[in-house]
């Protein structure tokens, strides 16, 4: 038996019409949605401070109100983590919607992830739960299952457990479903969204840039293998490379821990079965970890920012003058932290004003509001006619805003409750996995050039090859993102490359941790790890601490590292010409 599980949301704020599009677009057994991220938990925590009855994704309520009758009529069951910090509250709200519409649906929710009592001072503290609670709710007849902080893949793994009758020992099947869930959890990122090869897909007629991308579907078999696809007629494309792009997104190494299974990403096999159909097979799983991850958010103080635009000549001197004036003014009531960022992007003999302009950013933080509020804004505004020539700001500084910091912790799974609450109020306690193992393994990661075969292939290629200095993106695709304060980049050789194995050997030998620091100077002084994924002809790069204490507190231009992969692709390297000629 094969089940079809669709996705209609990759984040809080995704296209609201997607639920209806997926229900009307073709057959589904289950429809899932991922609404949570580290930053989202912080946002929901702020909402709940104002109103304890909130803390869930209110957009999901509107989607269900629009589509509940349609889902019921088509027999599609809905599973989502939109419950956020208040899954019971969301479940209750959905029952109100159903009652108002006169539709008989059973709404269950999963709770136990809220562990704030274990972490003093935390605004939010949520342990990642697995999928067996979702499966139990479906076993009990739920039409809609609402969860809090389960792992992103669990909303897909849960229906697969229910439909196929898997147990805790079906590790390979569970691992296969985790991979399926990971691929579709971010919605259209599996169908061409954020894909560095979009222009090639467009040129080949596989991607219509004017059509909204369709959301993905995982067809999961009883052994855990699956096909990633989409509804016929919906926009986007499903190829080995669009699937690979999502597979390497925000992973940490070649082993991927979930509460129910450890998935070995280096065992994944991808095959293009047909147009918009990619089969995933061969996935192996092993004993789940002792501990589960906990997402923690803390209120850290207040922050503000002012940006000064500098045009023409003497730009560095202009920046120095503005900085000296601001530092003098701020000394009267100093913030706890002042951070300066100078973006020297102006060019000589600029053809436009934009080409002749650089930017000086001043970021301030404080545990108190006033030093970064009116005190800071006045300091920036009051030098407007008394500073460098051509002074202007694109916007005035705003009042200081509260911000949070993220950190991860871990708790033994045996110490985290996992409970299903059924529509009648009865409760099902989900036991932790009976067999667990330490994670990660005690074997430290080795650089990808430790493989003698890879080194020999790359060395032989380098000895005989003419090289060309071109952007890395002439050879490889990439996708990047954040995990807390760390940046993750997946880099791989496209599936259609005529000499893919050799190209991978060159890539794996080229992108060592030291070389990554050379190409991306922001990583200087940071720990960098590189993991090979030869089955995907790619590597995974982790840059620890690039994003500070997480997206909510980061002052980086790109605080979630979404474009770091594109930056890497734009960097020039000497690549064997024969690899470029046979793309």
Image (cartoon, rainbow, N blue to C red):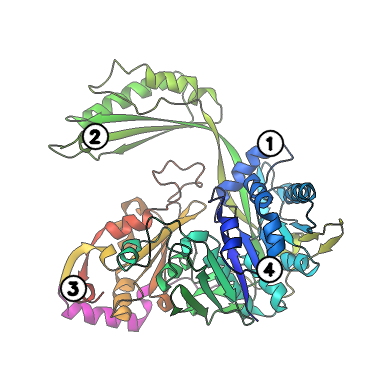
Give the camera-side residue of 372 and 2.
2
* Distance Cα–Cα, label 3 vs label 2: 37 Å
Q: Which of marks 3 and 4 is nearer the N terminus?
A: 4
* Distance Cα–Cα, label 4 vs label 1: 31 Å
Residue segment shown in magenta:
440-466
Residue 186 in sight = yes
Q: Earlier in the sequence, mark 3 or mark 2?
A: 2
Determine the residue positioned at 37% across, 20% down: 328
* Distance Cα–Cα, label 4 vs label 2: 53 Å
Q: In which quarter of the image is the C terminus?
A: bottom left
Q: Earlier in the sequence, mark 2 or mark 1?
A: 1
Relative to 175, is 210 above or below? above
Q: Which of marks 4 and 2 is in front?
A: 4
Q: What's the mark number on residue 577?
A: 3
Give the camera-side residue of 96 and 577.
96
**In the picture provided, is 223 more to the left or to the right than 381?**
right
Q: What's the mark number on residue 357?
A: 2
**In the picture provided, is 537 more to the left or to the right than 83?**
left
- How busy is the neighbourhood of tag 3: few (under 14 within 10 Å), some, or many (20 plus)? some
Determine the residue positioned at 54% across, 79% down: 283
Residue at the disc numbered 1: 49
């Amino acid at each position: 038996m094969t089940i079809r599980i669709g996705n209609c949301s990759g984040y809080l704020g995704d296209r609201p019409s997607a639920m209806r599009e997926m229900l009307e677009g073709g057959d589904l057994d289950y429809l899932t949605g991922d609404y949570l991220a580290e930053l989202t938990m912080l946002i929901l925590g702020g909402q709940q401070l104002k109103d304890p009855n909130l803390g869930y994704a209110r957009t999901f309520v509107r989607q269900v109100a629009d589509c509940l009758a349609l889902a019921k009529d088509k027999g599609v069951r809905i599973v989502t983590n939109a419950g956020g910090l208040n899954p019971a509250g969301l479940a209750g709200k959905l029952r109100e919607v159903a009652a108002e519409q006169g539709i008989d649906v059973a709404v269950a929710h999963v709770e136990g992830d809220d562990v704030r009592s274990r972490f003093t001072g935390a605004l939010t503290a949520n342990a990642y739960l697995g999928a067996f609670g979702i499966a139990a709710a479906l076993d009990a007849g739920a039409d809609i299952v609402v969860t809090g902080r389960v792992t992103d893949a669990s909303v897909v793994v849960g229906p697969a457990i229910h439909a196929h009758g898997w147990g805790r020992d079906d590790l390979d099947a569970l691992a296969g479903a985790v991979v399926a869930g990971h691929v579709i959890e971010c919605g259209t990122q599996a169908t061409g969204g954020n894909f560095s090869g979009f222009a090639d897909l467009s040129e080949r007629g596989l991607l219509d840039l004017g059509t909204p991308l369709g959301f993905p579907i995982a067809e999961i078999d009883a052994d855990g293998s699956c096909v990633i696809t989409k509804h016929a007629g919906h926009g986007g494309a499903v190829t080995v490379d669009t699937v690979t792009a999502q597979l390497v997104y925000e992973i940490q190494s070649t082993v991927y821990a979930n509460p129910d299974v450890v998935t070995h990403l280096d065992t994944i096999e991808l095959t293009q079965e047909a147009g918009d159909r990619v089969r995933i097979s061969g996935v192996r799983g092993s004993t789940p970890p002792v501990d589960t991850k906990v997402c923690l958010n803390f209120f850290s103080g207040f922050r503000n920012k002012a940006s000064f635009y500098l045009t023409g000549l003497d730009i560095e001197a202009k920046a120095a003058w503005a900085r000296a004036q601001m530092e003098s003014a701020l000394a009267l009531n100093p913030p706890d932290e002042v951070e300066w960022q100078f973006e020297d992007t102006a060019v000589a003999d600029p053809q436009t004003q934009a080409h002749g302009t650089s930017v000086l950013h001043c970021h301030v933080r404080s545990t108190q509001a006033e030093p970064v509020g009116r005190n800071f804004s006045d300091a920036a505004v009051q030098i407007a006619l008394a500073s460098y020539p051509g002074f202007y700001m694109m916007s005035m500084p705003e009042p200081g805003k509260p911000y949070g910091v993220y950190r991860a912790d871990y708790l033994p799974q045996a110490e985290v409750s996992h409970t299903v609450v059924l529509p009648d109020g009865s409760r099902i306690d989900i036991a932790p996995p009976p067999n667990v193992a330490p994670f990660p393994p005690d074997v430290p990661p080795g650089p990808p050039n430790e493989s003698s075969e890879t080194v020999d292939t790359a060395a032989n290629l380098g000895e005989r090859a003419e090289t060309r200095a071109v952007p890395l993106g002439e050879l490889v695709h990439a996708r990047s993102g954040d995990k807390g304060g760390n940046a993750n980049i997946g880099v791989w050789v496209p599936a259609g490359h005529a000499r893919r194995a050799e190209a991978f050997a060159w890539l794996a030998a080229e992108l060592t941790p030291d070389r990554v620091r050379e190409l991306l100077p922001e990583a200087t002084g940071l720990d960098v790890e590189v993991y090979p994924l030869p089955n995907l002809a790619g590597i995974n790069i982790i840059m620890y601490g690039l994003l500070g204490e997480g997206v909510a507190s980061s002052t980086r231009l790109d605080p979630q590292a979404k474009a770091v992969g594109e930056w890497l692709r734009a960097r020039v390297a000497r690549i064997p010409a024969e690899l470029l000629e046979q793309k």
